[in-house]
Image: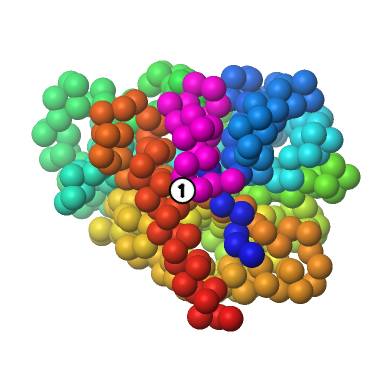
Amino acid sequence: MNLNQTWRWFGPNDTTTLQDVKQTGATGIVTALHHLQIGEIWTKQEILARKKQIEDTGLCWSVAESIPVHEDIKRQSDDYIKWIDHYKRSIRNLGECGIPVLCYNFMPVLDWTRTDINYPMPDGSTALRFDEVAFAAFDLFILNREGADQEFSQELVKKAESYLQTLNNDDKSLLTQTILAGLPGSEDGYTLEEFREILKSYNGISAADLKDHLKFFLREIVPEAEKANLRLAIHPDDPPFSLFGLPRVVSTENDLTDIIKAADSISNGWTLCTGSFGANPFNDLIGMVKRLAQRINFIHLRNIKIESGRTFHEADHLNGDVDMAGVMEELLKEMKHRLKNGRPDFQVPMRPDHGHNMLSDLHTNRYPGYSCIGRMRGLAELRGLETGIKKRMS
């Protein structure tokens, strides 16, 4: 029995079709109702329409990723109780429609953040990259965020100044667009002025405050998830450190332990994203899987290479700083343990996360990180790794 091999699909506008997905070998789909506004209730009618579209192609909807969490909920401001109620109703509807897992995140303002979405690799493909010097240059001199100069070392400030001198106006616009992009699957983003304003709305909110807000949210939604027979899987911060002075509360094993304790239920779990957690070299990925495996409800497998400091790029799935073989072995042990103990969720959904832009995809408009061929290569490599480890373990 294998992990449930899935594929992220961005809906009818995705240039990778469901028929394409079938050819990758994936059997499950990870998707969301991207056309709905943040905070809008996912009705059963909308969910069932998307589910039918997927099942008509011979695939199944394995994971909803994601129902975005409204900023009011994260700040506990304005209409946050209303938005939590909407979230509960969406959870209830997902469960009644037979969707088993919901992935979500609690990152303030931005989803995953990169400074380059076309970083050239030696083989001619391109990758996603986070460059701390480029990021500092944007924060300090393009965004001109108040207080930013106190959050970077003097050495990094000097490097950022030098880097800025190498950029023309088009380069600055591209860097801004890359950093302020909207959620994956969305065409929306922020203007510089909009971004400055929403950052101000988090003034005075500490990491402790944000974690308290997350715990409150969990105590509200986990009972609904239990009743709906739905497993929640919180996604880690990406990257797993503070950006723009905003707090981050899903970056370490201690964060996950706090989250699990906040609402002790099998419905309250986490997404093992090896790339997100792996970007912090102090995270013991294999140890985290061993100690918190029972609450892994979803898996994103990708690899990263830390270049220096906080600068990293996304590597081939089996070649990077993440010990992918070690992680896979622990996951297979957990699957075997669940099967032995009669857990119905022993086949945890796994998807190849991101992938290099390569071959004909270099000339096709794809969501950053979500090239078809790069992910298919990743899935094939991960499938082979899983098969080899299982054979050795038997």
Question: Which residue is rendered at x = 64% and y = 65% of the image?
Answer: 1
Residue 106 position within the rendered picture, expressed as x and y whole percent measured from the top left: 60, 42
Going by the image, does 39 lie left or right of 163? right
Residue 224, quarter of the rendered image: top right
Amino acid tagged 1:
Asp
Of residues 161 and 347, the one nearer the viewer is 347
Question: Which residue is rendered at x = 40% and y = 38% of the image?
Answer: 372
Going by the image, does 246 lie left or right of 337? left
Q: Is residue 13 magenta?
A: yes
Main SS, magenta residues: loop
- Residue 180 visible to an observer of this rendering: yes
Of residues 187 and 243, the one nearer the viewer is 187
Q: Is residue 354 above or below residue 273?
A: above
Say which element carries label 1.
loop
Question: Which residue is rendered at x = 48% and y = 60% of the image?
Answer: 383
Q: Extreme right residue here?
A: 227
Question: Which residue is rendered at x = 26% and y = 23% of the image?
Answer: 173
Q: Which residue is mark 1?
A: 353
Residue range (magenta): 8-27
Q: Is residue 42 above or below residue 221?
A: above
Going by the image, does 160 lie left or right of 287? left
